[in-house]
Image (cartoon, rainbow, N blue to C red):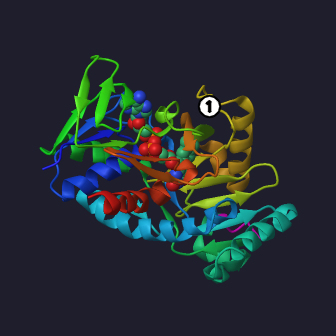
Amino acid sequence: MKTIAIVGAGLVGRVVALNLIKQGYEITLFDKDDATGNNAAAMTAAGMLAPLSELETAESEMFELGKHSILLWEGLLKQINAQDAMQLVGSLILAHPQDMAELEQFISNIQHKVSIAGEIESLNAEDIEKLESDLSHHQQGFYIKNEGQIDSQQFMQASTNYLLSNPQIKWFTKHKVSKVSAEGGVICEDDEKTYYFDLVFDSRGLGAKKDLAGLRGVRGEVFWLDAPEVKITRPVRLQHPRYKIYVVPRKNGRYVVGATQIESEDQSPMSVRSALELLSAVYTIHPGFGEARIVKMLTNCRPALADNLPKITKENKLITINGLYRHGYLLAPSMVEQALKEIL
Ligand SMILES: Cc1cc2nc3c(=O)[nH]c(=O)nc-3n(C[C@H](O)[C@H](O)[C@H](O)COP(=O)(O)OP(=O)(O)OC[C@H]3O[C@@H](n4cnc5c(N)ncnc54)[C@H](O)[C@@H]3O)c2cc1C
């Protein structure tokens, strides 16, 4: 049996590990942080699975990969006993009356990319009320069925528990890897050791910047709000000429509100400007958010390549999966499946 290392236990690393465990492999995981994954982009993400809504700024091939990932998530979540972390009841896209042209352009951009986008439903106030009774004050919008979200924090916690208790996994936490090599070497900064494996997966996300040409970070900021009096049951996007925001419901009245998208690798706390934009926009989606409690403000960077598309590379014993940008949850299962098909 091959000895396998996974360097970076964020989203991609965990999806690789879950797949390899099913195939009976023993794996060594390396991460610079502890096993919670609290600093990974995977933990900050809203976890939206929105293959059509995301097409406005993405290539049409992402649509098929995304649709396939949604099918694969079912098995992955079952494996870690977190089936209820995925919700697929469609998403709603709204705009203020003065921004309707913006929204119609958004839908038209998507419809030019894939024919199935013809199925996007246009909604009037009555239709919106039927779907989300708390949003009946909105006059017009669009509904995209079969979209949804993974509760990313639940996925991270359940996968931590599963991987830590799995005898096929050896997890080197707090091990910053300074180099991975095509010869199967994993060089750790902290214990100054080099470990050798038959196969090494590099899934360090932005941590691989110095080894992956063109990799950059794209800053994103999100709020976690507790608003028990707001009842929104599916992801809602607000199309706005200056910023695009979404509200993603979690369990027990919690909402993830995000996200800014700024060409910067600055991971410092949220700026006042971003806070003002996100909170004022969410307040216009539902005034009940005025009484919400701010639980967390998070900042992280999405790992992206020049074309904003994900990439798999293989060099001898080293496989790199990176560049998942703003679509990690949407694409990771498909990308990992593709990588493993080619290799194993
Ligand atoms: C604000 C925000 C919102 C998002 N929303 C969504 C969304 O709604 N839907 C969606 O599909 N995607 C979303 N994403 C994108 C998604 O989070 C990323 O695409 C995904 O997390 C990338 O996965 P990754 O494994 O490559 O990187 P990460 O998840 O960041 O994992 C990288 C791991 O590598 C470890 N590491 C780094 N360097 C080293 C090193 N030198 N040695 C050892 N370990 C190292 C890190 O500690 C980390 O655990 C969002 C991202 C952000 C920031």
Secondary structure mainly formed by the magenta segment: loop
Q: Position of residue 110 (x, y in %)?
A: 69, 71
Location of residue 188 with respect to 92 vertically, above or below: above
Numbered range of the magenta stretch: 135-139
Q: Is residue 138 magenta?
A: yes
Q: Residue at x 55, y 59 (%)?
A: 231
Location of residue 113 with respect to 194 vertically, above or below: below
Q: Is the residue marked 1 within 8 Å of ligand 1, measured from its CB?
A: no
- In the rendered view of the protein, which quadrant contains the C terminus? bottom left
**Apparent side of residue 300 relative to residue 58 in the rendered image (left or right):** left
| Furthest residue in direction right, as rendered | 98
**Type of amino acid at the residue the image marks with label 1:** Glu
Q: Position of residue 183 (x, y in %)?
A: 30, 37
Residue placed under numbered mark 1 in the picture: 265
Q: Residue at x 59, y 74 (%)?
A: 131
Location of residue 339 with respect to 10 vertically, above or below: below
In the rendered image, is residue 255 in sight? no
Number of marks drawn: 1
Q: Is residue 325 magenta?
A: no
